[in-house]
Image: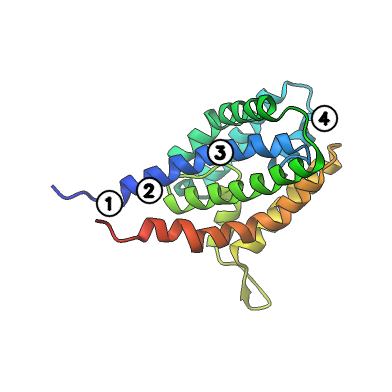
Amino acid sequence: MKEKDPLLKRRIILALVGMLLAGISVGIFKRAFFGVDPFQCFCNGWAQVVPIGFGTLYMLINAVLLVIDLFLDRHYIGISTFINLFLLGYVAEFTEGMLANMLGETGLAVRLLLLVVGIVLTCIAAALYYTADLGVSTYDAIPLYLADRKYKVSGHILPFRVIRIACDLLCVLIGFLLGWMPGVGTIITALFMGPLITFFRKRLSDPLLQKQLS
C-alpha cells in the first residue's frame, strides 16, 4: 500500500528539529539579556496587570489564541502547536541553565554574540516548522493566516515578512503600554524576524523538504 504523503517523515523531522531549535533559541535569547522576543513582551505586559502567576497567564493567553486559531483556520494547529505549548519552555529553561553554568558572567561581546545566534536560530526554527506544515505556535498562526488571505494595499499583496513585522511591533507596543519595557533585542527581533524567516524558508527549509527522495 502506497504511502499517502511520501514527504510525511521528512515533514515530521523538520517539525521536531524546528521546535527543538525554537526552545534552544529562546534559552540563548534570554541569556543574552537584551530583552525578550515580541510575543514574550506581549505576555510580560499582561503579567503587569493580571494578578496571577506568569506560567498560568502564559498558558491562558495561548489557550485564547488557540481558540482564535481554530476559529480562523484549524489547518495551522497540529503536532508542532502542542510541542510548542508543553515542551518548548522546558527546552528553553534547560538551555539557559546550561549556558549559565558554561559561561558564568558574560561581557557585552558575548551577549551580543548570543543575541545574534538566538535571533538566527529563532528564524531557522520557524522556517523549519512552517515548511513542515504540521502546525505552528498559536501566535505564529496569526501572521500566517493573514498572509494567506493575500490582503492588498495600493494594489500590492502584503507579503508575509511585512505582516509578521506588523504583528511583532503590535505585540511590543501592547506590552510596552501595559508596563513592560522592551529591550534592544526585542526591537531587533520585531523588525527582522519576518524577513529572516522568509529568507530561511527559501534557502533552507523549502529545499530540504523538496529535495529528491532517494
Q: Nearer the viewer, mark 2 or mark 1?
A: 2
Give the residue number, with chain letter if any, for mark 1. 5
Give the residue number, with chain letter if any, for mark 3. 66
Kind of residue at badge 4: Val
- Real-space Cα separation, disc 1 to disc 3, in angstroms: 26 Å
Q: Nearer the viewer, mark 2 or mark 4?
A: 2
Q: Residues within 10 Å of mark 1 (few under 14, many from 20)?
A: few
Residue 188 left/right relative to 156: right
Kind of residue at badge 2: Arg
Q: Are marks 2 and 1 in contact (CB under 8 Å)?
A: yes
Q: Are marks 4 and 3 in contact (CB under 8 Å)?
A: no
Residue sticking out furthest to the bottom: 155
Q: Please tell me whether mark 4 sits on a helix, a strand or a loop.
A: loop
Residue 62 placement: quadrant: top right
Give the residue number, with chain letter if any, for mark 2. 11
Residue 105 placement: quadrant: top right
Q: Are marks 2 and 4 in contact (CB under 8 Å)?
A: no
The residue at the point 66 percent across, 63 percent down is 162
Of the two numbered discs 1 and 3 on the same chain, state the one appearing first in sequence: 1
Of the two numbered discs 3 and 2 on the same chain, state the one appearing first in sequence: 2
x and y, in percent, of residue 124 in the image: 55, 51
- Real-space Cα separation, disc 4 to disc 1, in angstroms: 47 Å
Of the two numbered discs 2 and 1 on the same chain, state the one appearing first in sequence: 1
Q: Which mark, by number, is residue 49?
A: 4
